Amino acid sequence: MKPISKKEWRLRVLASRRASSALTREDESLKLCHAAAETVRGASAVAAYIPVGSEPGSLDMLDALRLRSPVVLVPVAREPGPLQWAEYTGRENLKAASYGLSEPTGPLLPPARVATCDVVFVPALAVDRRGVRLGRGAGFYDRTLELVAPGIPVVAVVRDSELVDELPEEPHDRRASHALTPSGGLIALNRE
């Protein structure tokens, strides 16, 4: 049987996300919010992201992270390459940005700022039990994760069905160390 390509995986996951009800997404977001907040207890800085469309997570999750960590950084995507960062200081300080994203109105921070974070949450379409993360294909996160200090948890935030046994992997892919799912909470992944 032919393995499923990254493109096919992306199409399947995006179709599944579109088919999920608003009530299901709201319930999942609430569970992810609580699990994420527990994950960062005692952290001095965390990196997260502002979800778009049907991506798992919510602004409530970012607000919960702010209650646990004095600094919450979110990405700012400009040119292809490592992501720049800005501090998330609340939903009232967000503006529309490139690629259909939202970003903070505060000052831009360099890509290397992610190296100061104790936990890095990343969006993913899926993640496998080895830590292989399936993104949207632009490579922003693969280039950014190279800057994360060794041993720092890189947490792929996915729906329960998006934690799978195996995804296709390419040499440039950077693995996650953990998955965060609505039902399972924080799950350590085997990075071997």
Image: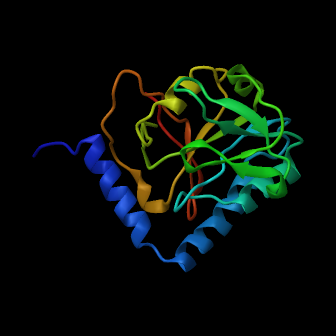
| Depth check, front residue: 86 or 73 | 86
Q: Quadrant of residue 5?
A: top left
| Depth check, front residue: 13 or 188 | 13
Residue 89, horizontal then vertical, whole percent: 85, 48
Number of disc labels? 0
Q: Evaluate whether residue 38 shows in this view.
A: no
Quarter of the picture holding the C terminus: top left
In the image, residue 9 above or below residue 32: above
Rendering colour mode: rainbow
Q: Quadrant of residue 119?
A: top right
| Depth check, front residue: 179 or 78 | 78
Residue 114, horizontal then vertical, whole percent: 71, 27
Residue drawn at point x = 68 percent, y = 23 percent: 111
Q: Evaluate whether residue 83 shows in this view.
A: yes
Residue drawn at point x = 64 percent, y = 45 percent: 97
- Left or right of 123, for residue 44: right
Residue drawn at point x = 63 percent, y = 65 percent: 29
Residue drawn at point x = 89 percent, y = 42 percent: 70
Residue 7, horizontal then vertical, whole percent: 28, 44
- Left or right of 53, for residue 33: right
Residue 42, horizontal then vertical, whole percent: 85, 41
- Left or right of 160, for residue 50: right
In the image, residue 143 above or below residue 93: above
